[in-house]
Amino acid sequence: MDHVINSLLPLTRAEAGVPIIYGDTLFGVLDLQSETVDRFTEAEIELFVSLANQIAIAMRNAALFEDAGKSRERAEQSDRVKSAFLASMSHELRTPLNAIINFSKFLKKEIPGRINDEQRDLIGNIADSGQHLLNLINDVLDMSKIESGALKLYVEQDIDLRNILATAINYTQPILADKPVSLYQDLPETLPLMHGDRKRLLQVFLNIISNACKFTESGSVRISAYAEQDHMTIAIADTGPGIAPEDADAVFTAFKQTDSGLRQGGGTGLGMPICKKLVEAHAGQLWFESESGKGSTFFVKLPLAESTQAEPKAPEKVTQYA
Ligand SMILES: Nc1ncnc2c1ncn2[C@@H]1O[C@H](COP(=O)(O)OP(=O)(O)O)[C@@H](O)[C@H]1O
Ligand SMILES: [Mg+2]
């Protein structure tokens, strides 16, 4: 048996072993054998060495690629765990928080019994802090949904954006109550209809309009809209502090606020990045133009549903709130 195997093997009279090595890692040995004595010349050995080096580089690249694939898989897995965790926690967090907010409002309205002024203020603080925390939780959950690609749009057909703008204005108008700021609506009698997620579009305009109202101390906030061939543009212009060119990136960066944003307090710096993603999910664009000290205008450009036209509605061209 030994004899058979030996007769099949070459009779090695010369052997060259070149390590396949990269840095401190030995991947293997390039082994060449010959039946001829002194078969390998200096030049050939040099060639084998450089061949072994090339193999080492290729093997190292392959190992790096495999590592990167594994870490990507691990990251994706942990992202999935994170969004599943957040989705289930969101309910657990929001339910007791809503109870805190609603019970404190109930107490403040003196439904269970009379309270004094100091108690009313303190209970008001509980409701406001609760609301702030609820907004923060909602924003963090939205952001994590967007980042993990789990954000879903519930698209409805033929939405009239004027209704959404009217609701957003109704909600944000109280922010201007004690300020010498006028709010103008400059909307056409009809706007073409669009397809989109009503709740998410409202969220976009609520944040942009409430930012404009929040940051503007005097002057005006003007909401205008116009339709062009296949899209419409909504502009929210204010005479607030404006955004300096060096702060432009911060506006759309999660958790970043400009100095005026920080001074104002109450925000999270998550609103605008979320809005941008929501508008982009509608195949639209969100951007702003601003001059420091002179105000800002935020633009939302949204694609239109094909050849649909809203029913004319009673014009409400300019509404002014002192
Ligand atoms: N109309 C505006 N005028 C001036 N600064 C603005 C305006 N809108 C947004 N910003 C700046 O962009 C930052 C990010 O906005 P946003 O994400 O909505 O955060 P916030 O939670 O502060 O409202 C704000 O903190 C503010 O610094
Ligand atoms: Mg905001």
Image (cartoon, rainbow, N blue to C red):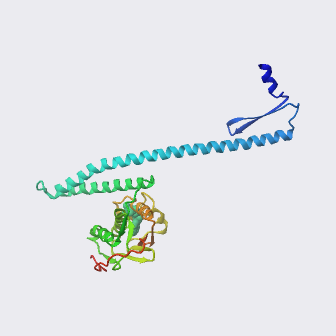
Image quadrant in which you'd find residue 213: bottom left
State left or right for residue 256 relative to residue 164. Answer: right
Q: Going 34% across and 47% down the picture, which residue do you hit?
A: 89
Can residue 262 be seen here? The reply is no
Q: Which residue is painted at 34% across and 55% down in the image? A: 138
Instruction: Tell me: residue 166, above or below residue 70.
Output: below
User: Residue 38: x and y, percent?
Assistant: 88, 32
Q: Residue 106 occupies which quadrant of the picture?
A: bottom left
Instruction: Relative to 11, say whether 86 is above or below.
Output: below
Which quadrant does the N terminus fall into?
top right
Name the side, left or right, on which 125 lies relative to 16.
left
Give the vertical position of 195 relative to 140 (above or below).
Answer: below
Q: Quadrant of ligand 2?
A: bottom left
Closer to the camera, 76 or 107?
Answer: 76
Q: In this rendering, would 270 be left or right of 312?
A: right
Location of residue 240 in the rendering, given as x and y in whole percent from the top left corner: 38, 72
Is 45 displayed left or right of 151 in the figure?
right
Q: Nearer the viewer, residue 124 or 58?
A: 58
Asked which quadrant contains residue 31, the reply is: top right
Residue 291, percent across and down? 45, 73
